[in-house]
Amino acid sequence: MLIVNGHVVDPETGLHEEADILVEGNRIKKIYVKSKNETSNAIRTGHEIIDASGCYVMPGFIDLHVHFRDPGLTYKEDIATGGAAAAKGGVTTVCAMPNTKPVVDSTDTLKYVIDKADRESPVHVKQLSSITMGMNGTELVDMKAMLDAGAVAFSEDGKSVMDIRLYRDAMKNVSELGAVIMAHCEDKDLVGNGVLNEGIASEKYNVAGICNSVEDVITARDILLAAETGARLHICHCSTKGTVELMRMAKGLGADVTAEVCPHHFTLTDADITTPDSNYKMNPPLRTKEDVQALIEGLVDGTMDCISTDHAPHSDEEKKKYFDEAPFGIVGLETSAALTYMTLVDTGLMDIMDMAKKMSHNPAKVIGIDDDYGKLTEGSVADIVIFNPNVEWTVDVNDFASKGHNTPYAGKVLKGKVMATVCEGKQVYKAN
């Protein structure tokens, strides 16, 4: 395979110019940089040619936070449809959260996901283990056994481990094993029956509110525990200005802590909920303009390390319910790249290199796969996304590869489109 005429963006080497990429097998064999008068013309015969004219060629995106609902909830999504949605969004590696039915708390369930992903997913699926058995918060899983069986990290996503002694033990284990915890920061007692952000949204729709301290209190707790135990900690789906400040504090303390932000949290506010549409219901909820600005500033200045989706598909029937009955969550794999580009890059807040860092290079480091992934260098695995920054398109949920149609962006015009995705040297998606 030969990818020609593209503008290659590689955070590893800083390459940011027109180049051709030769792929042999599942690896990048050679990069021909035009400014160095390197040309691939002599080898074009006999290779599959992908013309990337007018496009950025970046390392395949790595999404640290998705819900593929498999096993047990496959009417919402399964590994095959989730993998197809990822490929369509330029994502070549996903980290699947363990809150399935059954919970991924045993090596048997973990093996089921890994084996099915190998058979059915066009992209890499890295599976997380829960922190506690059944995600009940009372007994730790066998962390070493789960790591040995292929778990990439630990999370109780959807809730926090509220028993602080037990959680500290988990942190100590993670530190000793060289693993990472991905934390959903939510104070169970403080959130109560919260539905939407406390303020304009909760008042307008007469539902219980979720205050910022629901997230901030547990974020602070987790950072302090990580700093004390030496555990590697990744804070999921950050939504508040307080969390951004806490991340600045954590890095000042020298804690091994990283953080992600989802596109919906840096593109929408609670004021955007103008109709009782449960596609605007997610956890954490959409916050205020002040929170959004803080998240964007954190992404721009490097305080916030990664952009993930928290892709959370639900059935149309579930999302048709009113706010207080509908489940939390929206899909995001197929809109993430465009939302990031048009909000952060096209506006001049970031360079395209920063986008590649936040969506690929940094996530690879978080889960320790950066020897081969998250970069476009000779010898690295050929996971590649070809992205056209000039194409505008309208979000049509009926065109989604995901089973989930639950997005607040339906009907919206976005700018920037994934034209092709290559995973392990094979083209797994091509735009129509």
Image: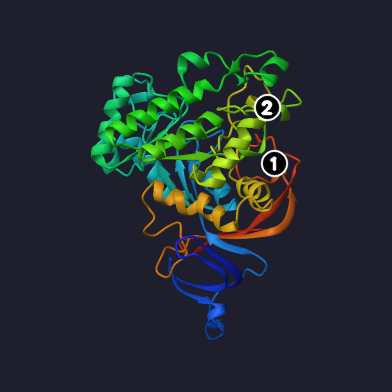
Q: Name the residue beneath numbered marker 1.
A: 397
* Number of residue marks: 2
Residue 29 screen position, x and y as percent: 43, 73
Quadrant hosting residue 37: bottom right
Query: Please, which colouring scheme is shown?
Result: rainbow
Q: Nearer the viewer, residue 337 or 101?
A: 337
Residue at x 40% of width, y 46% of height: 366
Crowd tier of the residue under label 2, counting other residues whose Cα lies within 10 Å: few below 14, some 14–19, many 20 or above: many
Which amino acid is tagged 2? Asp
Q: Name the residue beneath numbered marker 2.
A: 270
Residue 130 screen position, x and y as percent: 37, 31
Residue at x 45% of width, y 61% of height: 12
Q: For residue 329, which numbered disc appears in the image? A: none
Relative height, residue 209 to residue 16 (above, below): above
Residue 268 screen position, x and y as percent: 67, 35
Find the distance from the CA under tag 1 to the CA under tag 2: 22 Å
From the viewer's perspective, is 257 left or right of 352?
Answer: left
Which amino acid is tagged 1? Val
Q: Nearer the viewer, residue 247 or 80?
A: 247
